[in-house]
Image: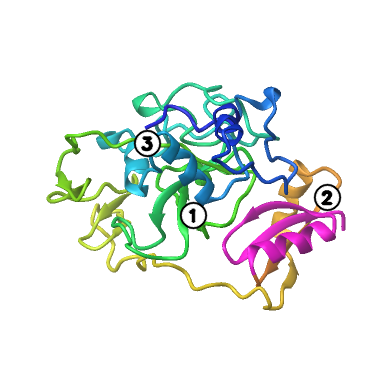
Amino acid sequence: MDATEVTVGAYRACVDAGVCKAPQKTEHHCNDLTDARAKRPVNCIDWNDAVTYCKTRDARLPTEAEWEYAAAGGEANHTFPWGEENPSRKNACFDAPDSCDVASFPAGAFGLFDMGGNVWEWTSSWAGPFPGEAKTGTRKVFKGGSFSRRWPKWLRVKNRAHWTPIEHGAWLGFRCVKSVTPIACPPDAEPKDGACERVRGEPLCEHGMKWNGEACNFVGANGAVEPGKPPAEVEPPALDPDEPVTVARAPGDDADCIKNYPGKPTAYRWNGATWEVRVKLIASRGCTRRDNSRTWISACCKS
């Protein structure tokens, strides 16, 4: 696995060779192909662009399982790539105004840099139940969190998000991996069809959770796995861009807006349609996004 995210400088060589497409310039934080940004992670490219670049090096994108194993330190199963300490500007490009030069912060597990923060990273995996590897789908998983996140939850190793392969963002980049032979698998796994597959033991769960036979679930106060299980994550249904967007006050977030977004003390939440539609509406009102999920965006406004 690459020690760092693919940089602007490395990707620019592929563009200059006429193989890779130049990054998009649709967002303020898109890194342009200049020497001043040569050590920044390349961003604003879609999944297909990332695949093309990796192929020029006889490499590929990591699967979600490979990425997660590497970021967690394998059997150490860290919550964050560097351990259990929450993200800060001491250990990650986190809560920052822009992306950072790669390897600006100490390496995490296996000597890998920026597995948490800087930019999210595309994987080769289709969105589907995890652990497991979906064979088909329409959305690709990305991992790791980005410079723009302000809450530790976004940089957890187990956190996952997904987008269609044709989308791109200033907060999304990638790194490559190369298969070696013979394949050396971690404990409880064996080679199968060019990859490692678990054949015994239990999947590693986040701290405070335990495998109940079907999924990772929370452990109760008595040490027992709580009954039931979280619903298996399957590929979500497509959102409707023509769905009406509703806007509602979110006074519980006002204090955060006052503290972190001067001049924009009033919080609202946009629900409905797609993420892209909501982003445009928020921008047209002059508000600033503070947090989001697949179906809503929270933003801070002047009034």
Instruction: From the viewer's perspective, tell me whether residue 87 is left or right of residue 233.
Output: right
Magenta segment range?
274-303
Residue 43: in sight, yes or no? yes
Q: Is 50 part of what is drawn in magenta? A: no
Q: Nearer the viewer, residue 259 or 136?
A: 136
Amino acid identity at mark 3: Asp
Res 73 → quadrant: top left
Please identify the quadrant where the C terminus is shown: bottom right
Q: How far apart, in angstroms, are the residues tagged by discs 2 and 3?
A: 48 Å
Q: Say whether residue 152 is visible.
A: no
Query: Between tags 1 and 3, which lies in front?
Result: 3
Instruction: Identify the residue at image location x=12%, y=50%.
Output: 200
Confirm or deny contact between disc 1 and disc 3 (CB under 8 A).
no
Q: Report the residue at 34% width, 62% height from top.
A: 129
Rendered image: mark on residue 58 = 3
User: Which mark is drawn over residue 161?
Assistant: 1
Q: Are marks 1 and 2 in contact (CB under 8 Å)?
A: no
Nearer to the camera, 48 or 294: 48
Density class for disc 3 (Cα within 10 Å; few <14, some 14-19, many ≥20) is few
Q: CA distance from mark 1 to mark 2?
A: 28 Å
> Residue 140: horizontal and vertical position, in percent?
46, 56
N-terminal of the pair, mark 1 or mark 2, is 1
**Mark 2 is on which residue type?**
Lys
How many labels were placed on the picture? 3
Residue placed under numbered mark 2 in the picture:
264
The disc labelled 1 sits on which kind of residue?
Answer: Ala
Residue 191 tag number: none
Q: Earlier in the sequence, mark 1 or mark 3?
A: 3
